[in-house]
Image (tube, grey):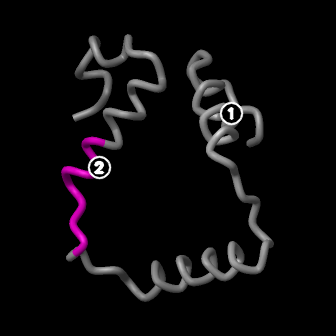
């Protein structure tokens, strides 16, 4: 099953697609899901980078602005332009 199977969803703005994706993700995720050792190491490394100030932190306003700029046509916006 792909997005192409649902033309009405393809027409939604990016922000609505993200909300729907989040709802689907939350419906399929459980706190009881196992975490592999590789995933734990990655999470630990990211947490350490965050705590040490090595990773960029975003304010709520910056995060919201990023979502708004993501409403540009597919393949453009922050992710598309940053590589």
Q: Residue drawn at (39%, 24%), measured in percent from left and top?
A: 16
Comes first in the chain, label 1 or label 2: 2
Residue 40, above or below 50: below
Q: Secondary structure at mark 1?
A: helix
Residue 28 within the magenta-colored segment of the rendering: yes
Determine the CA span between mark 1 and mark 2: 22 Å
Residue 12, image x, y percentages:
38, 15
- Magenta residues, start to end: 23-31
Q: Residue 80 at x, y = what percent?
A: 68, 33
**Residue beneath the point at 26% across and 52% down:** 26
Which one is in front in this view, the residue at disc 1 or the one at disc 2?
2
Q: Is residue 21 above or below residue 31?
A: above
Counting other residues with Cα less than 10 Å from the Cα at mark 2, is it few (<14), some (14-19), or many (20 or more)? few
- Kindly identify the residue that appears in the image at 20 percent across and 76 percent down: 32
Would residue 42 be found to the left or right of residue 35 on screen? right
Where does the image place residue 31, in percent across and percent down from the top left? 25, 72
| Residue 56 horizontal/vertical position (percent) | 76, 59
Q: Quadrant of residue 46?
A: bottom right
| Horizontal side, residue 30 vs residue 4: left or right | left
What residue is shown with label 1? Answer: 80
Residue bearing the label numbered 2:
25
Q: Is residue 10 magenta?
A: no
Checking the image for residue 31, the label placed there is none
Q: Is residue 79 left or right of residue 30?
A: right
């Amino acid at each position: 099953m792909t997005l192409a199977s649902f033309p009405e969803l393809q027409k939604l703005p990016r922000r609505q697609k993200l909300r729907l994706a989040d709802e689907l993700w939350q419906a399929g995720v459980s706190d009881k899901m196992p975490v592999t050792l590789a995933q734990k190491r990655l999470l630990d490394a990211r947490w350490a980078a965050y705590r040490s100030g090595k990773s960029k932190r975003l304010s709520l306003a910056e995060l919201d602005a990023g979502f708004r700029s993501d409403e540009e046509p597919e393949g453009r916006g922050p992710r598309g332009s940053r590589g």
